Amino acid sequence: MRDREKVFIHTLKQSGATFGIGDDGVSVGTYLIANDAFFEDIHFKRAWASLEDLVEKCFLVNLSDIYAMNAIPSFLLLTLSVPDNFKEVSKLAQIIGDCAKKYRIKIIGGDTLVGEKLHFSLTLLGQKRQRTLFRKGIKQGNILGYITPKGALNHAKMQSFGQNLKILKNSLRFCRDKKISKYSRFAKPLLYPKMLFELNNIAKAGMDISDGISLELSRLSQVNRLGFKILKQKGDWLYSPEEYQMLYAIERRNLKKMQKKAWKFRHQFVPFAVAIRGKYIAKKQNWHE
Amino acid sequence: MRDREKVFIHTLKQSGATFGIGDDGVSVGTYLIANDAFFEDIHFKRAWASLEDLVEKCFLVNLSDIYAMNAIPSFLLLTLSVPDNFKEVSKLAQIIGDCAKKYRIKIIGGDTLVGEKLHFSLTLLGQKRQRTLFRKGIKQGNILGYITPKGALNHAKMQSFGQNLKILKNSLRFCRDKKISKYSRFAKPLLYPKMLFELNNIAKAGMDISDGISLELSRLSQVNRLGFKILKQKGDWLYSPEEYQMLYAIERRNLKKMQKKAWKFRHQFVPFAVAIRGKYIAKKQNWHE
């Protein structure tokens, strides 16, 4: 799909009808708005998790976009499609309501309909804080780093989930009837909004990592017209997807300050690259098909 | 689906996580936001119309919600799902871009993915004008009326479309392989924003008619805790769906003024009911399943 998505977005941009596309969300008035879809058999399989976990994951993916741009998630619009034989409509509504309350989001609209599968499409509005953090804004010499609770991005739990997800996705793609391993796990990203808001204030630019650092770097490269020199030994950490940890660019002089702040929340800011003249192109290791 | 949708929305509201649900859109800051899904084999069949017409219809349904609340459509977020064998991604992007330009809307975000079918889910933001028009605000004695270009709501073209659509939907529901009549038509609603903005200013309350007047009246009855006495002979006009014409409540003294304004745009304001104490319950004649 990635290629078709590229064609689609490229053509749409060429048409001159777009505005602000390229960040996790877009700034409109005092709000930041992010849109994400979460479709059965594309982003998840029902067997992977309970309805509670599915709904929460779907919220967290969107929350992450809003936090990443330094806004406070406030309002949600939801398009929900449920299969014809879906018996848990009332339960699902309860779960969605509870999840919204947990994250202090008001549901302000939506559409529910019967489709072939369980699909969620979310539009989340966040109230802007003082300063909005964009992907753009990186200068030569800035330090790139990621946030992690354990000093390495792909810590055990995430890695295990990532590998399982890859196997699952491949099995979905090539062999739809293949049984899913009972060991498969469904990781919910952990978000620390308080920490993110403090780090966002120090950073020059940032984004959440959803497709692996390497792919995100190539996006930052394009937007900022800069390259990146990787300072850390290359490895899985560069390609591990679906982390929902932040990627930040900071001024060199703020490195200590950034690390201290992260540490306050038992996290690490791990510097791994420096912005240089040039272009960064990701090795092909796409996650989503 | 209507029943399940009711259960879903009822449970969600009970959870205390909702805000402002009940109008065509919801007011957030200086914006009005509306959300609508347009799914293949639920809201349309590919064979009914060209891609251009499908996209425009899908825009118009959302535009109508925004106009109805007296706002100027400004920004769009779009979740698009295309079937795996869909070859016209670039063409579709071009059509969507052109349509957005035609209606002066900027596309600010979205998600594209491969699904089973062609699905659109739109979130449209409208810039509020001086006064927002809600469904609430009707008082006893107010006159209810609809807007139509020809003096009767279900004029020939619409009626023909409506009947065809009904047959098509039934055939979709009960007999999925049934061939669709080559006479089936796919009506694009006609919207006159300039007129609507002038009429909106006179009205006490309003909404666009998407499920037939009778069903919309029962919604107005619930929100306003009032009944409606129908003054016109009951007939098809009360149940004809998918008109995207406005339903207004006005003060009795503004009837002439309202009719004059509509006439200026070659339309008629047709009064058909008066707000009374009590409750209006629609006869069961649901459109969407």
Image (cartoon, coloured by chain):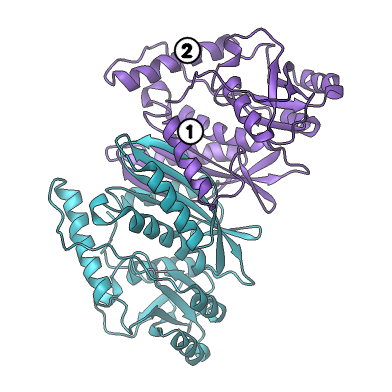
Chain colours: A purple, B cyan
Find numbered disc 2 in the image and state the secondary structure of the residue it sits on: helix
Residue A264: image quadrant is: top right
Quadrant placement of the N terminus of chain A: top left
* CA separation in Å, label 2 and label 1: 22 Å
Residue sticking out furthest to the right: A253
Could you tell which of marks 2 and 1 lies nearer the N-terminus?
Answer: 1
Asked if B235 appears above or below A219 in the picture, the reply is below
Tell me the subunit letter for badge 1. Answer: A
Residue sticking out furthest to the front: A278
User: Horizontal and vertical percent for residue A234?
Assistant: 62, 9
- Mark 2 — residue? A163
Find numbered disc 1 in the image and state the secondary structure of the residue it sits on: helix
- Mark 1 — residue? A55
Q: Is residue B85 left or right of residue A127?
A: left
Asked if B236 appears above or below B175 in the picture, the reply is below
In front of the other: A16 or A131: A16
Disc nearest the viewer among 2 and 1: 2
What label does residue A264 carry, if any? none
Disc 2: CA contacts within 10 A as few (<14), some (14-19) or many (>=20): some
